[in-house]
Image (tube, helix red, strand yellow):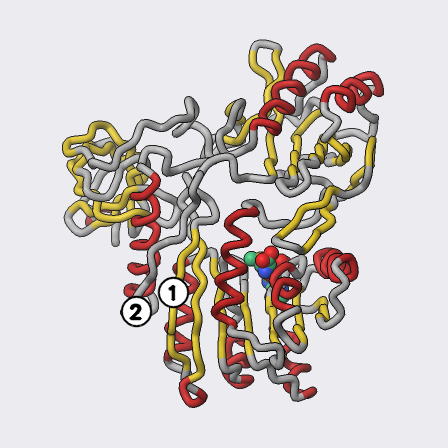
Amino acid sequence: MRVKDRPVAATKIYEVNITGLSHNGEGVGKIKGFTVFVPGAIPGETVLARITEVRSRYARAALEEIVTRSAHRATPVCPVFGQCGGCQLQHIDYSRQLELKREVVVQALKRIGHLECEVLPVRGMDNPWHYRNKGQFHAGKNDGRVFFGFFKPGSYQAVPARDCLLFSPAVNNLLGYLEQSLTESGVEVYHPQTGDGRLRNLVIRESSATGEMMAVFVTTHEKSLNSHFLQGLGEAFPQLTSVYQNINPGRSPLALGPKFRLLSGKPEITDKIEHLSFEISPGSFFQVNRVQTELLYRIVSEFAELNGTETVLDAYSGVGTIALFLAERAKKVIAVEENEKAVADAQKNARGNGIKNVRFIAQRVEDWVTNAALDHERPDVAVVDPPRQGLNRGFLQALVTMSPARLVYVSCNPATLARDLGHLANQGYTINAVQPVDMFPQTGHVETVVLLKKNNRG
Ligand SMILES: C[S@@+](CC[C@H](N)C(=O)[O-])C[C@H]1O[C@@H](n2cnc3c(N)ncnc32)[C@H](O)[C@@H]1O
């Protein structure tokens, strides 16, 4: 649409009926048919919104006033909600968050996949707080005091994340201690604009199964942290069993650099998913919400309907958690993942759990299927868990040719899920169940597990 034809103008205020929620938790409405995103507005509300940005197909607006208030509007518990980029939905009561997330999936399936299928209610958490086992905090300084926080949406400005409700009290205690002792030690904090300073970021991981914690101090230089400081830290937090320094020089916006140095304790912490143990090193991927991961994997397992005779494909297998979870119910599992480090972690985790019937392959799934066709490798059941971009087109086509009887699709992006399901539904698969799971309460994200069955095999 040409600029002069767009029915909205920057800085002007309009009345908008909010009818939906975007994939990142913004209210969505229309002004004379033109889509407007209003962060902080809730579906069902009428609001006055000031246009802040006009693009060719949509505009973004700031919430000025609520004309008709939603009965589901809640008072955000966090004092920095709206400034910090961590949460988007604290202003909506939790049961409504779940209903709205379900609606996001329903609408994506309808609009993008042209699919009208039943979407089950979202499986939420009994306690939708304190669920994160990993935090990546940016270092900042306010009035000479060191703090750790998250970036404001769309900026490199850190907002203090003190007492963040997504973490456990133990993590918040550790953050408070570190802020105090690093302030006293006079550490120089990195400035993203100038590149000056030393301490950039802090990564904290916590195992909810064992209580062990890991801290990674990300610095611009090799110089180690003060031994006095490390000793005090160890004495104050005996559960901090692993302390690393990561060196991240240069101006890269990535949180971590390539080099890790163990400063104290052991190289890994141990976490669990049900009865399986996982050794987590500072660079490993591990699911962030353990309670919901266990639920998600139980749903995957239920959908896979394994009886011990099947060959299962786990495509986009990461550190192999789904493969290992399904291994004892299958004859064998083939796990394919492009990241070699993740595959090495997966192999180690298989050995640690005494699992021998999983073959891990470090390859792109689209490359692996070419060889698999040559080897006549035909899985009975396929589980796919791709990144946000969804399934690679070539892989999807090869998957259809392999024609597993059951296909379990785990997705973190309803839009690409809908696109891929639309394709599979035209290629002989029937959608049997769509089960969203809330892996990240208070945020706009929704995970979905879908069971598809091959038509001609029932
Ligand atoms: C959503 S994660 C899956 C994580 C894993 N299934 C789990 O539950 O922890 C997606 C994974 O796909 C991998 N990946 C991305 N593109 C790939 C490709 N073309 N072939 C193989 N793996 C890929 C990423 O490295 C990442 O580990």
Q: Is disc 2 surrounded by few (<14), some (14 to 19) or many (20+) residues within 10 Å?
A: few
Find ligand 1 in the image and state its quadrant: bottom right
Q: Is residue 73 above or below residue 422?
A: above
Disc 1: which residue: 434
Locate residue 154, reporting x and y percent. Answer: 46, 36
Secondary-structure class at tag 2? loop
The residue that appears at 37% across and 81% down in the rendered structure is 426
Would you say the residues marked 2 and 1 are in contact, meaning their CB atoms lie under 8 Å apart?
yes
Locate residue 56, reporting x and y percent. Answer: 30, 50
Can residue 340 be spotted in the picture? no
Disc 2: which residue: 117
Compare marks 2 and 1 and give the one earlier in the sequence. Answer: 2
Q: How many dots with numbers?
A: 2
The residue that appears at 57% across and 47% down in the rendered structure is 290
Can residue 272 be spotted in the picture? yes
Residue 177, by quadrant, is: top right
The residue that appears at 67% across and 28% down in the rendered structure is 200
The alpha-carbon separation of the residues under discs 2 and 1 comes to 8 Å
Locate residue 419, reporting x and y percent. Answer: 40, 68
In terms of depth relative to the viewer, which is nearer, 443 or 24?
443
In terms of depth relative to the viewer, which is nearer, 399 or 76?
76
